[in-house]
Image (spheres, rainbow, N blue to C red):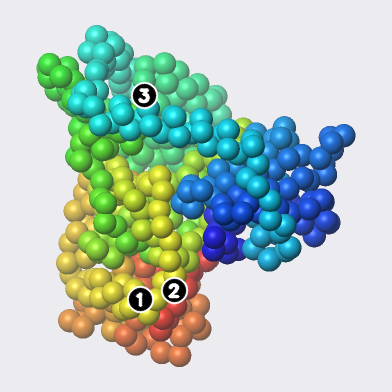
Amino acid sequence: MNITDEYIKRISVNDSAYKNGMALVKSKSFLKYYISKDGSVIFSECTGSAKTPYKVFVDFLDNDNPVFYCTCPSRQVPCKHAIGLIYAYSLKERFFTEETPLEILEKREKALLKKEKKETQKSSTPKPKKVNLSAEKKKAEMQLEGLNILEKLILNIINDGLGSIDKKKIDMIDAQSKQLGNYYLTGTQIMLGNLISAFMENDKELSYQKSTICITSIYVFIKKAREYINRKLSDPEMKKDTDTDIETLLGYAWQLNDLEASGSYLDDAKLIQLKFTSYDDPYLKEIVDKAYYINLNDGKVYKTYNYRPYKALKYIPEEDSIRSLILPKRMYIYPGYQNRRIRWESADYREVNSEDIDNLKALAKSSFAEVLKEVKNNFKNILSDKDNAVLLHYIKIVKVSDNYALKDDKGELILLDKKDVPLIISLSDSCDDGYMLADICKSEDNTLIYAKPLSVILDKKLVEICF
């Protein structure tokens, strides 16, 4: 078992669990450490708030999917006691050899029976997922009703004028947004949340610009969603569209079996994380972990999301930067546009080597004209999420009037936000022949397209940019 600090952070539910687990080891809360004769199980007892010590086990029979057991009342998996036990093992604390605990043998037997049953079901002739057409039809009809309500709301806002927006109207829009969930339009809550945020901008001109964009987007969505739902109602099988993200915008939560059934997956992905960030969404009351990855096999930049509602922060693991090369057993790809969302259930990890970095550089886009053409097409799709993260190869950073820009080998330019440049320059001895992951954005007044640096490759290292 190769246990690294990065691995422990990755399996920890959150940073508190990670730190609390380390603290248990440092405070010598574990009575004695044990390891099974075959080396697959580590176990111990840990003093806590209960009268008797908690029994904690970590079963590494399947290295890719360790199983954690603890008698403590925590609902977190792994709990701080399991994290502490693994941390102690990584520190090479003395572990005494013992027989595999009976509790583990019993749990393994149950897990094996469950696995055999699952494999038997898999090996039998697969039955197509049965769709309750009657329920699907009723749901679609209710969505059409909800779209009528949403359309009426937007038309009222337009007719009354943006100058009439006050706290009372914002509260009404918020209440209407929640009501639309009853019509299976949960995706519209994000759209109306963005509209409310635009209304609350302090800068009136900026508020007007953002509000206009939001209203236009919602109106286009209503039209396209109505067409899509009517088309689906005319389909005897009521099939969902897996080529665009219209179902996601309506609020459908894609399951992995949906993506597998539609063939939306890859089995040979080799991923390097290019950028990790977390942000707070106060309207939806959740923390979102977001990361960009590049697949060394197809050169595409993908993204992941990990949603952690405020109420469940203790139980949903927060994600972190990953410095290893990731080899998912199966990488599922969600419907979407430029940077499609991905997810995997299990993966192998290894160190990123110099050859991987060379392959990464070879995948960078060197023709800015082609990049801008593709990005502009994405901007034209008013319903796209506007993520345009691209790995760029630039020849030079040049001064353009009072601004800066990336320059490619054909002389094409992509503007940078000038406040980003000093840090980029300070990271490197030269502004020539560089590699950058950048989000291609539009200025708030829609007059400029520019690159927002997310990370840069310096020699053989990837450096994330934080502003």
Looking at the rendered image, the disc whose residue lies closer to the viewer, 3 or 1, is: 1
**Residue 140, picture quadrant:** top left
| Residue 420 visible from this viewpoint | no
Residue farthest along the right direction in this orientation: 51
Circles 1 and 2 in contact, beta carbons < 8 Å: yes
Q: Which residue is mark 3?
A: 185
The structure residue drawn at horizontal position 62% and vertical position 32%, both measured from the top left corner, is 311
Where residue 380 sits in the image (x, y, percent)?
21, 49
Looking at the rendered image, the disc whose residue lies closer to the viewer, 1 or 2, is: 1
Q: Nearer the viewer, residue 374 or 196?
A: 374
Q: Name the quarter where the N terminus is drawn.
A: bottom right
Mark 1 residue crowding within 10 angstroms, few (<14) / some (14–19) / many (20+): some
Against 267, residue 190 (above or below) is above
Circles 3 and 1 in contact, beta carbons < 8 Å: no
The structure residue drawn at horizontal position 38% and vertical position 86%, both measured from the top left corner, is 431
Is 156 on the left-hand or right-hand side of 409? right
Q: Which residue is mark 2?
A: 462
Q: Which amino acid, mark 2?
A: Leu
Q: Which residue is mark 1?
A: 357
Where residue 147 sits in the image (x, y, percent)?
30, 21
The structure residue drawn at horizontal position 28% and vertical position 65%, both measured from the top left corner, is 296
